[in-house]
């Protein structure tokens, strides 16, 4: 029982792993020996015997003595090779060839590599030898194993031609299937040969034995020059013909062919990536076939039922649309027999892009550029087609939008536009809906080439280019000059700003000194006054910053009439302008502040009275003046109103009275306000008035410089900064219950008492809508 099990196991192993034994491959010449007449030509073939194993690459080197035989030609007619690294080549002493063929290679016993033709030079014996050292036969095993074994040469006997001998040339054999050594699958083959000079009869033979010879029996000779071969089995055949004049015979002519009617045995297809799931990239198709007969000669492919086209493995799709696809591969052998196999796979679908601009059925006016935009899947590339032709691509950004500008000329009239998306793997979406547009070119047509050539010939183009260059240089120099002038004006404005800032700081310092000296001004009313001064400083600084804005000095070239060395000089103003500078406040928060003024013309003494809710207010004979806090919209640089410029201090009963004549009669009292105050608290006129005079002059010069640049007329209000204090003359019958009368910097009268938020220094001025600044300078 155990012995039987061992025997069965050995048989199974032999069946599963059969041993393969091949004889060594070899190179040989067509015959071991040959006898020729001197001066006669003869042909020798170099052949390969694979020893029964597939081979695919060959290198042969044949040597000879050129003193005995002269090389004439080397050809590849009838060879089994389809690829030549080195074509058959003859030199004075050797012949070489390096060639190969496609998978599955050659497994026969007499595969021709090349044909060599020589001429016998002199009588004697010589040899043609195959050099085993440099000749190779490589197996079709994927490793290129050299399976070269022994090789055999050819002995040539060269004899002198007898004087009486008649020479009959060797006939030439032809066939409709091709040259000698070809493969065919034809059911019948027509063979033909020519009639050499002196020949009258012929003998021919079809055999599978390469050493067999036609009959030389005169009784079997025929005069035919053609014959048809039928019902041939698959295999290698030799057709031989000999010519005769009835007594002498020519050399034997041989024609070799192979019959193969079987299709390749196997064909394997493989796709990468795997087709088990829908793939997201253009695939690669690998294929391989085997044929035991003539071997595989070529492959052809059909995609989705289309026409077949030749290809070599592997086949890579550059692009492919989403959806289901089929690919069919055919493998052909040397005789034209083929086998085919079909593979089905699925590709992911990409949403088609959408054209948003231009609109469908719209008329598009272009001036040399057509802009196209739309939406698509992020990360894809959009292919853009105009009238069926690809005109460009555009990347879809992270927002799913693509943009493309087509800068090639488009003819007027109707056109069709559509787009397709392609992902990074080469997968294409379906085409978008066709967008029909009508193009209207707005530019003049481009001159024809002949006109351009004429312009070039007449040097007009050269002249135009030279003129343009000169103009460019001129404008560059002009730009530098303009920039220098602008820089000089900007420097002057900066210097003026520094002077104004210094003057404002002096005002603030002096007022703070006076406030500290006067205890009455240290209360809430004093804080209000201090806050009004700070607001005025801030607003003035904002006005100067606006004047220095780069956009406002662009037109500085117009200021040529202004001397760059002009000094800013103070001008004299009415000393009571101090009250106007300290009485500006936003109309949204108007608070009356009782003030009485006293002085003799050389100085004035302001003193804030008690609030109206104090008992002393009923007997207070003094009028009140409203101090309005300057807001951002009440630009100090705008100066005081023209109505207030006529204000002055006039003595009334020995007391200085502030009055104005410009306020409408229905909004003020004509009775002067008595401001009889003690003179212990005095703000010197030469301290405040001169300082404010300098500030006002600086602002006026800046405003004049700005207004000459032809800016918005609303800025002309700045020019009204040379304003004097208005004169207030309340009626003599003023009662203690009368509301305080106040005027703003534009001469408007207010008798409304607002809340007390203006006393809080933390309250910021509120920017209003009636600011004299243009909107662009806010």
Image: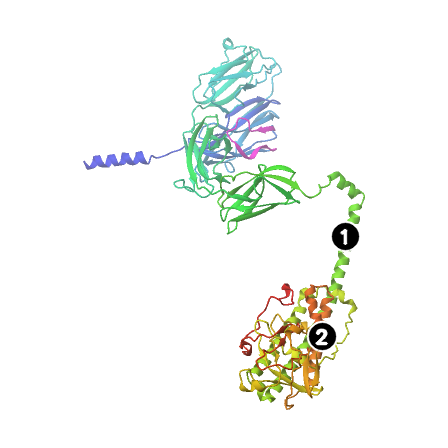
Q: Residues within 10 Å of mark 1 (few under 14, many from 20)?
A: few
- Of residue 160 and residue 680, the one placed in the foreground of this image is 680
Residue 246 lies within the magenta run: no
> Does residue 388 sit above or below 660 in this rendering?
above
Q: Residue furthest right?
A: 458
> Does residue 324 sit above or below 659 in this rendering?
above
In the displayed structure, does residue 747 sit left or right of residue 454?
A: left
**Residue for badge 1:** 468
- Residues rendered magenta in the picture: 71-92
Residue 15 appears at what percent x and percent y? 31, 33
Residue 384 appears at what percent x and percent y? 56, 42
Helix, strand or loop at mark 1? helix
Circles 1, 2 touching at the beta carbon (< 8 Å): no
Residue 52 appears at what percent x and percent y? 42, 30
What number is the disc on residue 61? none
**Residue for badge 2:** 722
Q: In the image, what residue occupies the spot 69% across and 68% down? A: 717
In the displayed structure, does residue 147 sit left or right of residue 158?
A: left
In the displayed structure, does residue 625 sit left or right of residue 477?
A: left
Instruction: Count all numbered tags in the image, as a single digit.
Output: 2
């Amino acid at each position: 029982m155990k012995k039987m099990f061992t025997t069965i196991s050995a048989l199974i192993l032999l069946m599963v792993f059969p041993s393969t034994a091949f004889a060594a491959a070899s190179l040989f010449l067509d015959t071991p020996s040959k006898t020729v007449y001197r001066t006669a030509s003869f042909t020798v073939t170099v052949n390969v015997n694979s020893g029964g194993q597939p081979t695919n690459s060959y290198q042969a080197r044949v040597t000879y003595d050129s003193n005995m035989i002269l090389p004439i030609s080397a050809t590849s007619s009838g060879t089994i090779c389809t690829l030549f690294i080195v074509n058959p080549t003859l030199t004075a002493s050797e012949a070489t060839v390096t060639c190969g063929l496609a998978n599955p290679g050659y497994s026969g016993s007499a595969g021709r590599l090349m044909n060599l033709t020589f001429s016998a030079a002199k009588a004697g014996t010589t040899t043609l030898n195959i050099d085993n050292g440099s000749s190779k036969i490589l197996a079709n095993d994927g490793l290129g194993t050299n399976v070269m074994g022994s090789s055999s040469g050819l002995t040539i006997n060269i004899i002198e031609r007898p004087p009486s001998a008649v020479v009959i040339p060797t006939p030439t054999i032809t066939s409709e299937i091709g040259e000698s050594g070809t493969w065919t699958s034809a059911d019948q083959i027509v063979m033909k040969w020519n009639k050499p000079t002196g020949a009258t009869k012929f003998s021919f033979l079809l055999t599978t034995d390469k050493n067999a010879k036609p009959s030389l029996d005169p009784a079997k000779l025929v005069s035919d020059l053609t014959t048809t071969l039928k019902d041939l089995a698959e295999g290698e055949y030799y057709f031989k013909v000999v010519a005769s004049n009835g007594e002498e015979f020519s050399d034997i002519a041989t024609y070799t062919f192979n019959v193969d009617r079987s299709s390749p045995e196997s064909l394997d297809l493989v796709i990468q990536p795997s087709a088990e799931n829908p793939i997201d990239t253009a695939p690669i198709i690998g294929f391989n076939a085997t044929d035991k007969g003539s071997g595989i000669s070529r492959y052809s492919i059909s995609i989705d039922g289309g026409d077949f086209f030749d290809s070599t493995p592997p086949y890579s799709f550059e692009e492919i649309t989403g959806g289901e696809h089929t690919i069919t591969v055919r493998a052909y052998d040397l005789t034209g027999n083929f086998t085919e196999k079909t593979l089905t796979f699925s590709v992911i679908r990409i949403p088609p892009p959408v054209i948003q601009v231009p609109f469908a059925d719209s008329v598009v006016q272009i001036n040399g550029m057509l802009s196209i935009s739309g939406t698509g899947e992020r990360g894809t590339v959009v292919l853009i087609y105009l009238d069926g032709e690809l005109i460009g691509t555009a990347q879809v950004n992270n927002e799913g939008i693509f943009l493309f500008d087509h800068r090639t000329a488009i003819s007027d009239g109707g056109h069709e536009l559509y787009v397709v998306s392609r992902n990074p793997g080469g997968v294409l979406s379906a085409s978008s809906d066709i967008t029909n547009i009508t193009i209207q070119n707005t530019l003049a047509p481009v001159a024809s080439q002949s006109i351009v050539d004429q312009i070039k010939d007449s040097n007009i183009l050269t002249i135009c280019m030279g003129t343009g260059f000169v103009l460019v240089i001129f404008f560059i120099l002009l730009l530098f000059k303009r920039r220098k002038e602008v820089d000089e004006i900007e420097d002057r404005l900066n210097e003026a700003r520094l002077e104004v800032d210094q003057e404002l700081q002096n005002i603030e310092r002096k007022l703070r000194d006076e406030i500290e000296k006067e205890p009455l001004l240290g209360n809430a009313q004093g804080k209000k006054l201090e806050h009004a001064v700070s607001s005025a400083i801030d607003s003035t600084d904002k006005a100067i910053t606006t004047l220095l804005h780069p956009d406002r000095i662009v037109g500085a070239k117009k200021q040529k009439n202004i001397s760059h060395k002009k000094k800013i000089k103070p001008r004299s103003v009415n000393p009571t302008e101090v009250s106007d500078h300290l009485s500006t406040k936003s109309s949204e928060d108007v608070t009356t502040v009782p003030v009485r003024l006293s002085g003799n013309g050389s100085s004035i003494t302001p003193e804030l009275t008690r609030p109206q809710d104090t008992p002393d207010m009923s007997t207070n004979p003094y009028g009140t003046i409203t101090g309005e806090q300057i807001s951002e919209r009440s630009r100090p640089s705008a100066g005081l109103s023209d109505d207030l410029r006529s204000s002055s201090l006039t003595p009334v009963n020995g007391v200085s009275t502030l009055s104005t004549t410009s306020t409408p009669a229905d909004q003020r009292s004509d009775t002067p306000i008595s401001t009889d105050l003690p003179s212990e608290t005095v703000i010197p006129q030469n301290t405040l008035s001169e300082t404010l005079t300098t500030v006002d002059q600086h602002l006026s010069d800046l405003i004049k410089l700005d207004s000459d640049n032809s800016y918005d007329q609303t800025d002309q209000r700045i020019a009204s900064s040379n304003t004097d204090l208005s004169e207030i003359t309340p009626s003599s019958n003023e009662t203690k219950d009368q509301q305080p009368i106040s005027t703003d910097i534009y001469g408007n009268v207010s008798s409304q008492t607002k809340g007390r938020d203006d006393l809080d220094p933390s309250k910021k001025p509120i920017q209003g809508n009636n600011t004299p600044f243009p909107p662009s300078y806010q």
